[in-house]
Image (cartoon, rainbow, N blue to C red):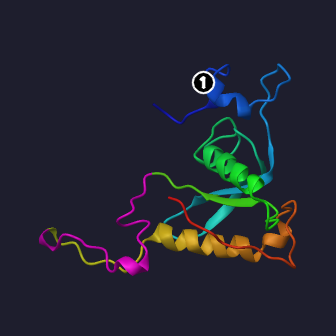
Amino acid sequence: PGTPSLYDLDTSSQRLQHLQQKDGDNNWNTRDDVYITYHTESTEDTGVLDVEVRSGPLTPIGFGETDTKFGPEVGLGWTLGDLLSKDDSDDCGGLFIIKVAYGSVSLDQDFRPPSSGDIHVNPSIGEEPLGGYGWAYKSLVDHVRTTLNNIENLGIPNYDPDVGYELIGLIF
């Protein structure tokens, strides 16, 4: 129940050893090759994601709901970072995660992409058909575009504007 916290877990667990420094103080490791920016505080009225909460190298805590919480970015970032570092034949320069998180949203309406057509409603109770995409989908796409248009000013280590970036995926 509640948002998970690594502080609530058994830090002696073998499953967490790669996340901890070996200094005996239970400090967390940092992935310098995985950079994350986490924005939140969108409103449905404007659909604008306008508050940058945190950004920096990926750590096991600090990019969740609070700075002592974590989310799926930890496992995703660590795993993809490991895969990229094993196969660095193209010298990709690292991984950049743009985290966007909303609470209590649905895939059917809030995150519905335009390719899914109009949102289906129940006309028998007076609901009118909605537009072809959800507010959270539009906000997410706008936020990613804005972030990538400003990528040179984010302080991402190893980012080379002459090389640019490759947008690889979206994970829900």
- Using the rendered image of the protein, determine whether residue 151 is visible from the camera's viewpoint: yes
Depth order, front residue of 168/38 = 168
Magenta span: helix, strand or loop, mainly? Answer: loop
Q: Secondary structure at mark 1?
A: helix
Report which quarter residue 18 is drawn in: top right
Left of 27 or right of it: where is 138? left
Q: Residue at x 68, y 59 (%)?
A: 97
**Location of residue 142 in the rendering, given as x and y in whole percent from the top left corner:** 60, 75
**Location of residue 12 in the rendering, given as x and y in whole percent from the top left corner:** 67, 19
Report which quarter residue 5 is drawn in: top right
- Count of numbered marks: 1
Q: Residue at x 73, y 55 (%)?
A: 36
Q: In the image, is residue 32 part of the stretch drawn in magenta?
A: no
Left of 24 or right of it: where is 76? left
Q: In the image, is residue 117 part of the stretch drawn in magenta?
A: yes
Report which quarter residue 26 is drawn in: top right
Q: Residue at x 68, y 35 (%)?
A: 68
The residue carrying pointer 1 sits among few (fewer than 14), some (14 to 19) or many (20 or more) residues within 10 Å by Cα, namely few
Residue that mark 1 sits on: 8
Left of 90 or right of it: where is 168? left
**Location of residue 147 in the rendering, given as x and y in whole percent from the top left corner:** 71, 70
**Location of residue 165 in the rendering, given as x and y in whole percent from the top left corner:** 75, 73
Q: Residue at x 65, y 24 (%)?
A: 14
Region in magenta = 104-124
Quarter of the image with the N terminus is top left
Name the amino acid, label 1.
Asp
Q: Is residue 135 above or below residue 87?
A: below
Q: Is residue 47 above or below residue 98?
A: below
